[in-house]
Image (cartoon, rainbow, N blue to C red):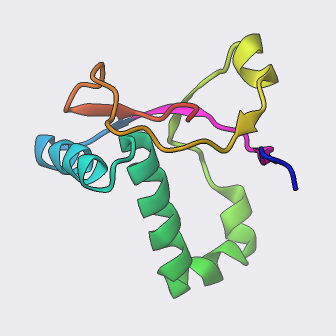
């Protein structure tokens, strides 16, 4: 049995705007579950998407393929794109460099 499990996951960096209250709660929830703020946002969205039956039906429609992207995605550098993701323990706290009003997704 291998000691490491390599997961081929492509991560993007994107900027989102949150209210101060929501940003604080993301950080508080991250501390509560001992994860990063990025992990909280990623898992919360995955949970909502999987539970919303109307959204699941929408994804099957042709309209879902014709959306206009509104998420501000930052292009990865050559180094970031070449590095494979490895499953690792979740950090104990979120990054201190995050501002409470803007949370940026990052490669975890």
Q: Residue at x 80, y 44 (%)?
A: 8
| Quadrant where the image shows the N terminus | bottom right
x and y, in percent, of residue 93 in the image = 31, 37
Query: Dividing the picture into quarters, in which one does residue 10 lie?
Result: top right
Name the residue at the right extreme: 1
In this rendering, position of residue 3 left or right of residue 90 = right
> Could you tell me which quadrant the C terminus lies in?
top right
Identity of the residue drawn at 32% across and 56% down: 33
- The residue drawn where x is 71% and y is 38% is 86
Residue 30, how many percent across, how many down?
A: 30, 48
Q: Nearer the viewer, residue 83 or 87?
A: 87
* Image vertical order of residue 76 relative to residue 89, above or below: above
Q: Point out residue 17 in the picture as x, y percentages from the top left corner.
A: 30, 37
The location of residue 83, given as percent across then percent down, is 77, 24
- Asked if residue 14 lies in the magenta stretch, the reply is yes
The foreground one among 30 and 74 is: 30
Using the image as rendered, state which of residue 84 and residue 1 is in the foreground: 1
Magenta includes 106?
no
Examine the rendered structure and indicate whether residue 16 appears above or below residue 81: below
Up/down of 62 relative to 76, above or below: below
Q: In the displayed structure, does residue 7 sit left or right of residue 49?
A: right
Which corner quadrant of the image does residue 79 belong to? top right
Q: Which residues are magenta?
A: 5-15
Q: Nearer the viewer, residue 49 or 107?
A: 107
Whether residue 15 sits left or right of residue 64 in the image: it is left
Query: Extreme left residue here?
Result: 21
Q: Residue at x 78, y 46 (%)?
A: 3
Looking at this rendering, what residue extends furthest in the top direction? 78
């Amino acid at each position: 049995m291998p000691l490491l499990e390599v997961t081929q996951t492509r991560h993007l960096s994107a900027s989102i705007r949150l209210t101060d209250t929501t940003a604080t709660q993301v950080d508080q929830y991250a501390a509560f579950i001992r994860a990063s703020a990025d992990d909280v946002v990623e898992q919360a969205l995955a949970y909502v998407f999987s539970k919303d039956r109307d959204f699941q039906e929408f994804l099957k429609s042709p309209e879902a393929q014709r959306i206009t992207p509104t998420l501000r995605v930052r292009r990865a550098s050559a180094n970031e794109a070449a590095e494979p993701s490895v499953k690792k323990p979740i950090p104990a706290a979120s990054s201190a460099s995050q501002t409470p009003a803007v949370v940026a997704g990052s490669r975890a």
